Image (cartoon, rainbow, N blue to C red):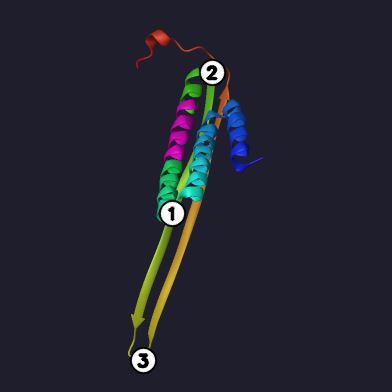
Amino acid sequence: MSAIDIVGIAARVALEINPVTSLILKATESAIEKSNAVVEKGSIEELKAEAMRQEISLKMAKEQARVSQEIAIARRIDTAEEVTIEEFYDTSGDANVGLKSTGEAVSFGVNGSGKHVTKRVYKFKGWHDIDLENVEI
């Protein structure tokens, strides 16, 4: 069984479970097929160009998946009886570079610190139908 076959099976399973993951897997499957064709027939320049195309394509698929996920969350919020949302985001960092000179010595220093906190919890309870007549599009 080839890598393409495995990714294809994973994409079909993911589509049933989570359409967001499916987008990334489909892009990966396409990238594998294209890279295999270029490896067999292409030059180094063509390989580099294909690698750049795939990197850009996968970044776009990742962003599309994020948008799809946010839309799915928004739809679920609209149809839930009760929604609990907890979000914490704090990405901070600090860095310093210094050079100090005295009459007798020169010193150079680098320091840095960072903090990364991320938590995102959504809890949905219940279900209610939305009134499509009053929804503005």
Query: Dot 3: few (<14), some (14–19), or many (≥20) neighbours within 10 Å?
Result: few
Q: Is 108 above or below relative to 22?
A: below
Q: Is 96 within the magenta?
A: no
Find out whether the residues at labels 1 and 3 contact each other: C-beta distance under 8 Å. no
Give the secondary structure at mark 2. Answer: loop
Q: CA distance from mark 1 to mark 3?
A: 58 Å
Q: Earlier in the sequence, mark 1 or mark 3?
A: 1
User: What's the magenta region?
Assistant: 60-72
Label annotation for residue 81: 2
Give the secondary structure at mark 3. Answer: loop
Q: Nearer the viewer, residue 64 or 124?
A: 64
Label annotation for residue 104: 3
Q: Nearer the viewer, residue 129 or 11?
A: 11
What amino acid is at disc 3? Glu
Find out whether the residues at labels 2 and 3 contact each other: C-beta distance under 8 Å. no
* Number of dots carrying numbers: 3
Which residue is labeled 1 in the image?
43
Q: Position of residue 47 (x, y in %)?
A: 44, 52
Q: Quadrant of the C terminus?
A: top left
User: On the image, which quarter does residue 1 sit in?
Assistant: top right
What amino acid is at disc 1? Ser
Q: Is 40 above or below relative to 80?
A: below
Residue drawn at 42 percent across, 53 percent down: 48
Q: Is 104 above or below relative to 117?
A: below
